[in-house]
Image (cartoon, grey):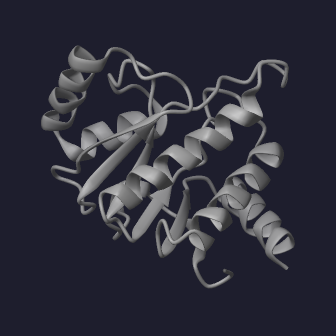
């Protein structure tokens, strides 16, 4: 599995993969951080596609995922998921984070996606501690690879500090 999970210091919107994951809000309305960057790079069609999904299905619950075209992105698809807001670990946040990654991998598989790139879901504005999030993300992704849901997984980290922490922890987790 070591050669199938990659930690990248860079901009997720430039990832050369079939699908990128958006750490979205429940309204799928764009916002700050990774969500805003993806919406800006994809163009206004992405917001319209998200609004259509919300009009048909309602707000996206934490842990679930939906898919849209990538529009102006290099990626063919954007998989939108809502991670948990950190409340000190008392609100099942770890389980919801695991479910967010699982939902993305299952949706990718259902659409024939072989390569996928994730941000650090919930680790920005939503306040999930990275030291707790990394093992959840990596363990779920290892399971997804073992199940054949996708063939390669990338984690894109935008800050040097985040990249170094992910790189170090993933090396430890994967031996």
Is residue 152 something that shows in the picture?
yes
- Residue 115, image x and y in percent? 41, 70
Which residue is rendered at x = 33% and y = 14% of the image? 58
- Residue 16, image x and y in percent? 34, 70
Q: Nearer the viewer, residue 44 or 103?
A: 103
Compared across the picture, whether 122 is left or right of 172 comes to: left
Q: Which corner quadrant of the image does residue 140 belong to? A: bottom right
Q: Which of the image's four quarters has the C terminus?
A: bottom right
Q: Number of marks in the image?
A: 0
Q: Is residue 76 above or below residue 93?
A: below
Compared across the picture, whether 108 is left or right of 135 comes to: left
Q: Is residue 137 above or below residue 36?
A: below
Is residue 6 something that shows in the picture?
no
- Residue 57, image x and y in percent? 29, 19
- Residue 76, image x and y in percent? 23, 59
Which residue is rendered at x = 77% and y = 59% of the image? 165
Which residue is rendered at x = 74% and y = 45% of the image? 133
Q: Is residue 158 above or below residue 28?
A: below
Compared across the picture, whether 141 is left or right of 148 comes to: right
Q: Nearer the viewer, residue 111 or 87?
A: 111
Q: Which corner quadrant of the image does residue 47 belong to? A: top left
Which residue is rendered at x = 32% and y = 48% of the image? 78
Q: Nearer the viewer, residue 103 or 71?
A: 103
Q: Which of the image's four quarters has the N terminus?
A: bottom right
């Amino acid at each position: 599995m070591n050669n199938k999970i990659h930690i990248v210091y860079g901009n997720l919107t430039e990832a050369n993969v079939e699908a990128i994951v958006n750490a979205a809000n429940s309204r799928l309305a764009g916002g700050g951080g990774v969500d805003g960057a993806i919406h800006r790079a994809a163009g206004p069609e992405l917001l319209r596609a998200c609004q259509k999904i919300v009009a048909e299905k309602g707000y996206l619950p934490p842990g679930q995922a939906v898919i849209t075209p990538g529009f102006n992105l290099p990626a063919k698809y954007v998989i939108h998921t809502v991670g948990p807001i950190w409340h000190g670990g008392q609100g099942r946040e770890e389980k919801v984070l695991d479910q967010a990654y699982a939902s993305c991998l299952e949706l990718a598989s259902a659409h024939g996606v072989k390569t996928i790139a994730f941000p650090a879901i919930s680790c920005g504005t939503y306040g999930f501690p990275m030291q707790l999030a990394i093992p959840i993300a990596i363990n779920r992704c290892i399971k997804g690879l073992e199940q054949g849901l996708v063939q390669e997984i990338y984690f894109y980290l935008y800050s040097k500090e985040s990249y170094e922490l992910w790189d170090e922890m993933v090396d430890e987790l994967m031996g």
